[in-house]
Amino acid sequence: MDKLRCMEVMVAVVEAGSFAGAARQLNISAVMVGKHIQQLEAHLGARLLARSTRSRHSLSEVGAAFYEDSKRVLEQVRWAESAVERSRAAPQGLLRISAPITLGGQLIAPLVAQYLLQHEQVRVDLQLSDSVVDLAGDGIDAAVRIGQVVDEGLVARPLKPYRMVIAAAPAYLARHGQPRRAAELAQHSCLSHSVWQRRNEWTLFDGQEALRWPEVARFSCNQGDGLRTAALQGLGLIMQPEVLLADDLAAGRLVAVLQGSSPPPRPVHLLYAADRRQLPKLSRFIEHLVGALGS
């Protein structure tokens, strides 16, 4: 039994004054109107309508109370439906996004700011973490991830690949010379990301030989920006994401070296659940991000 439909028929009968009038209003047969009322009365175990004349019906005491409550329920349903329509026209509400720390801080955060300037009724909670989040369990609408996609039943939209750059300050290269092969890194002062020692290592190439970034470092840090600051002081060579070093490379504060030995780029994807794509706040964000960073 469709309870809302039965309530709608009940209200139409009361307001039209007869089954025939309700049938015309709802564009169904009078027989069908009667069936809906019978189903409702059987479900409730109470008589709602009493025939007062040959064709007109009057409300019982229980029916009068049910009629008033039904009108309120139907009004709430109409309000909810209109709210959905409004949200389709104008994105609104809270959007929760997850992204890796460096990529998120350098690229995603500025794009989120642009998106918010375009959609004033949306709020964004951007969570930067290199941990893999559970979208459904953590209440995340969309996540940007680096690396191959593990099938989680999510939609994966490709973004620009994540590239690494090996670089040093001109002052360091003036003192120690520029390495010509990846194997020479062992004789240089290399600044290391401490997380690489446990996971997420990058592979360099010296011709056909695969090499790792030197494990022994005078300075290590668990944040790329700390390594960048040390490199700008001339402390040594770093290998960090292109998005983090782009401005320094363009300004000459850092110089890229061993470009043929840099690790292969890793894929980046924007992930979200297919059933949430219809939310305007998310669909517009997807369009915005893919438009700016789509591969």
Image: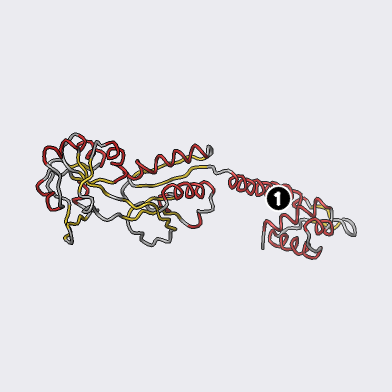
Tell me residue 173's x, y (percent): 15, 40
Q: In which image quadrant can residue 205 be found? A: bottom left
Identified at 43% across, 61% down, the residue is 153
Count of number-bearing discs: 1
Q: Which of these two is toward me, 168 or 135?
A: 168
Residue 245 figure quarter: top left
Q: Is residue 201 visible?
A: no
Q: Residues within 10 Å of mark 1 (few under 14, many from 20)?
A: some
Q: Does 254 sit left or right of 67 as displayed? A: left
- Picture coordinates of residue 251, whole percent (x, y): 28, 36
Where is 211 relative to 189, above or below?
Answer: below
Horizontal arrangement in the rendering, residue 67 relative to residue 274 (left or right): right
Q: Nearer the viewer, residue 201 or 43?
A: 201
Q: Nearer the viewer, residue 17 or 221?
A: 221
Q: How is the image coloured?
A: secondary structure
For the residue pair 101 and 239, the one nearer the viewer reads as 239
Kind of element beneath mark 1: helix
Is 99 placed left or right of 86 in the picture?
A: left
Residue 200 position within the rendered picture, expressed as x and y whole percent measured from the top left:
24, 53
Q: Residue furthest left?
A: 187
Q: Is residue 21 left or right of residue 286?
A: right
Residue 136 image offset from top left, x and y in percent: 43, 54
In the image, residue 234 above or below residue 87:
above
Where the C terminus falls, by quadrant?
A: bottom left
The kind of residue tagged 1 is Ser
Looking at this view, name the residue that lies furthest to the top. 233
State whether residue 80 appears in this view: yes
**Circle 1 residue:** 70
